[in-house]
Amino acid sequence: MADQKESSVLFSLKELMNLEEDRIREEEAEKARRARAELEARETRERSARESEERRLRDEEERRRAEELRKREEQTRLEAIRQGEVEKARAEAEHKARAEAMAAQRAHEAQLASINQDEHKKRLQITVGVIAFVFVAAVIGGGILLKKHNDQVNRERQEDARTRAELEARATAAENQVKASQEKESELKSALNNAKDEADRVRIQAELTKAQEQTAAARRGLRTVGGGSGSGSGGGSKPAAAKPACNCTPGDPLCSCL
C-alpha cells in the first residue's frame, strides 16, 4: 500500500515536471516567435524606409531634370526673341539707309532738272558737285553706321555663345559630380547593410555621412550654376528710339518718312 502511494506521488511529480517543462518550452517558443516577429517588423520598417528614400531621390532627380529642361526651353525662347529683334533692327537700318539714298537721289534729280533751266553754267556745276558730295557722304555715312551696327551684333552673338558654353560646361561638371556622389552613397548604403560588425558599420556610416555632405554640396553648386544660367540669358533688348513726327504732305513722292 505504501509502495502504491509512493508510486502515485512520483507519478504526480513527474506529471508536474512534464507540465512545467511544457510550459517552459511554450514560453521559450513564444519568446522566439515574438523575437522573429520583431525582427521581421524591424526589417520591414527599414526596407520601407529605404524604398521611401529611393523614391524621394528619384522624384527629386525627375524634378531637377524637368526644371533644367524648362530653363533650357526658356533660354532658347529668349534667344529666338533676341535674334528676331536683332534681325528686325538690321532690316530697319537697311531700309532707312535705302530710303535716305533714294530721297537724296530724287532730290539730286530734281535739282538737276531745275539747274538745267538755269542760264548760269558755273552755278549748275557747283550745285551738281555739292549735291553729288552730299549724296556720296550720305551713302558712305549710312554704310559706316550699318557696318558698326553689324559689328556690334556680331560681338554680342560671340559673347552670348561664349557665356552659354561656359555655363553649359559648369552645369555638366556639376551634374557629373552629383551623379558620382549619389553612386558613392548607394555603394556605402549597400556596404552598411552588409556590414559584418559594429566597427565596420561605424566606419561605413562615417563615410556615408561624408558622401551625403558632398552630394548636398554638389547639388548646391548645380543650383548655383542653374541660377547663373537663368540670369545670364534674361537681358532685355534696348527700347527702340521714337520716330520723329512726319510733317510731309500726303502723297508727296519725296517724303522720307516712308
Image (cartoon, grey):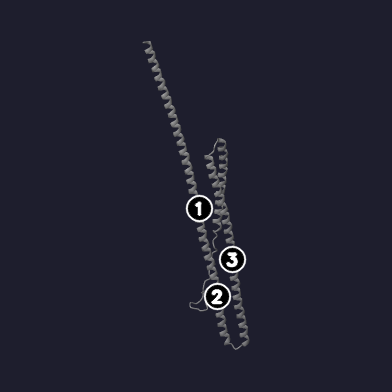
In front of the other: 127 or 25: 25
Please tell me the numbered disc located at residue 14.
none
Name the residue tied to disc 1. 65
- From what the image shows, is residue 35 above or below residue 172? above
Q: Secondary structure at mark 2?
A: helix
Query: Is 209 positioned to the left or the right of 10 in the image?
Result: right
Q: For the point 55% across and 72% down, which residue is it?
A: 94
Query: Is 122 positioned to the left or the right of 90 in the image?
Result: right
Whole-Å distance between the Cαs marked 3 and 2? 22 Å
**What amino acid is found at the position of numbered circle 2 in the picture?**
Arg
**What amino acid is found at the position of numbered circle 3 in the picture?**
Asn
- From what the image shows, is residue 146 above or below residue 196? below
Measured as percent of width and height from the top left, residue 182 is found at 54, 47
Name the residue tied to disc 2. 98
Tell me where residue 168 sits by quadrant: bottom right
Mark 3 vs mark 2: give the one in front: 3
Query: Is 44 positioned to the left or the right of 164 in the image?
Result: left
- From what the image shows, is residue 210 above or below residue 226? above
Q: Secondary structure at mark 3?
A: helix
Whole-Å distance between the Cαs marked 1 and 3? 32 Å
Name the residue tied to disc 3. 154
Measured as percent of width and height from the top left, residue 249 is found at 50, 77
Measured as percent of width and height from the top left, residue 29 is found at 43, 29
